Amino acid sequence: MSETLPMDEKYNAHMSTYFREYEESLKEPEKFWNKKSKIIDWFKPYEKVLDDSKEPFYRWFTNGKLNMSYNCLDRYINNDKRNKVAYIWVSEKGEEKIVTYYGLYKRVNAFAKALLNMGLKRGDRVTLYMPMILEAPISMLACARIGVVFTFVFSGFGAEALAQRINDSKSKIVITADGVNRKGNIVELKKIVDDAVDLSEGVDSIIVVKNAGNKINMEADRDYYYDDIIEDAYVIPEEMDSNDPLFILYTSGTTGKPKGIVHSTAGYSIWISNTLKWAFDPKDSDRFWCAADIGWITGHSYIVFAPLLLGLSSIMYEGAIDYPKPDRMWQIVERYGVNILYTSPTAIRLLMKFGEKYPELHDLSSLKTLGTVGEPINPAAWQWFYHTIGKDKCPIIDTYWQTETGGFTISPSLDLGLPALKPGSATFPLPGIDPEILDDNGNEVKPGGKRVYSS
């Protein structure tokens, strides 16, 4: 792939950094990733960037020691990020909670202590079945802090799908909420968990966050309210090996049995933090809104871990983007001064059908970058997003990637040099990615076609 990248004068003028970084990433990958690994902190340096002696079972950053929770929180509590906003949480009903990096650190430690008190230890598994509430990232970070592997199940799945993932991951504890608010109604999550646990084996306890206020069944000596078990505490972050698993995330299973994708600690941390930096070039003062669900890989990587690894301020929204009115997304952008909005083509097409009326009700001038994730964005949606929402001034970072990759693989890069943008095109591969396009017979399709330049 590297030999086919455009090297003409016009591109070299503003993409020289991209070409240099990309070429090095393919020709000297160990040197390249040794430099990029400095984006996180290590308890103990790794001995080797890449161990490929058992190909294709590669091991990255061998024998390095680190902790994801430490990298997201502890390293900030004694510097100027201590009191910086980590999350602004907004509910469908308009409730608001703001938590700083220090506040998140305290909450994560408190819940990590509660999990230890319940008998969890390094290497154990838990299942999270939660809505878009602050306790979701808190739970993920608390698990990471003590070396417990979590699997997050999207709260739209039913009891059978949940039970399947509980059983496959061999989870001992399920963390959930009483319910979730959705378009004015309450989805009773605890009831779904109860049904799933009846179909499961090995679940000792259920932890329940009070969220929607709906009446639920609580079984003695099995079910515990989140608020009743946390205590103010400090938990020493577990020293995890680079290749220790961080989480398991199951594919949707719409075309077959869902498969559990395991992401390890170091490689995943380094990849998602660098890809967020490359693609969006977020500044310390930016407010970043990844308007996805935390239960999918987009939420794991770009609502929780990567923004915290980079010390950003993020928006979290629990609710539907077209409720109570189709201007809900634009209302949040205006109210909180969102600078980077990362959403899906499906969401864009949904809001598109209401026309320009609702966006025009709000001041969207804080936006400087737009982004898309999920299925490929069709040109009509791209144009609407660019003209109506971005006012012809916000580049659209169209990202291509998968649950398996953990982070962006093909995307425009604001940090390395923004290429000409074309509706429907994710442009170039990010450093470290050498893609091939295959035809129906598995043969490589050679590049071709006319390049479109921006003015």
Image: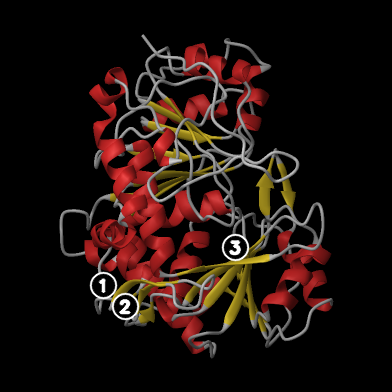
Q: Are marks 1 and 2 in contact (CB under 8 Å)?
A: yes
Q: Which residue is mark 3?
A: 210
Outermost residue toward the bottom in this view: 119
- Distance, label 1 to label 2, CA atoms, is 7 Å
* Mark-to-mark CA distance, 2 and 3: 39 Å
Between 303 and 52, the residue placed more toward the observer is: 52
Q: Nearer the viewer, residue 302 or 35?
A: 35
Give me the residue at 46% from left, 64% from top. Answer: 138
Dot 3 amino acid type: Lys
Q: Is residue 451 above or below residue 230?
A: above
Instruction: Name the residue type under label 2.
Output: Gly
Question: Residue 118: image x %, image y %?
Answer: 54, 87
**Which quarter shows the C terminus?**
top left
In this view, the residue in front, 153 or 404, is: 404
- Give the image location of residue 324, x and y in percent: 64, 29
Residue 388 visible? The answer is yes
- Mark 1 sits on what residue? 42
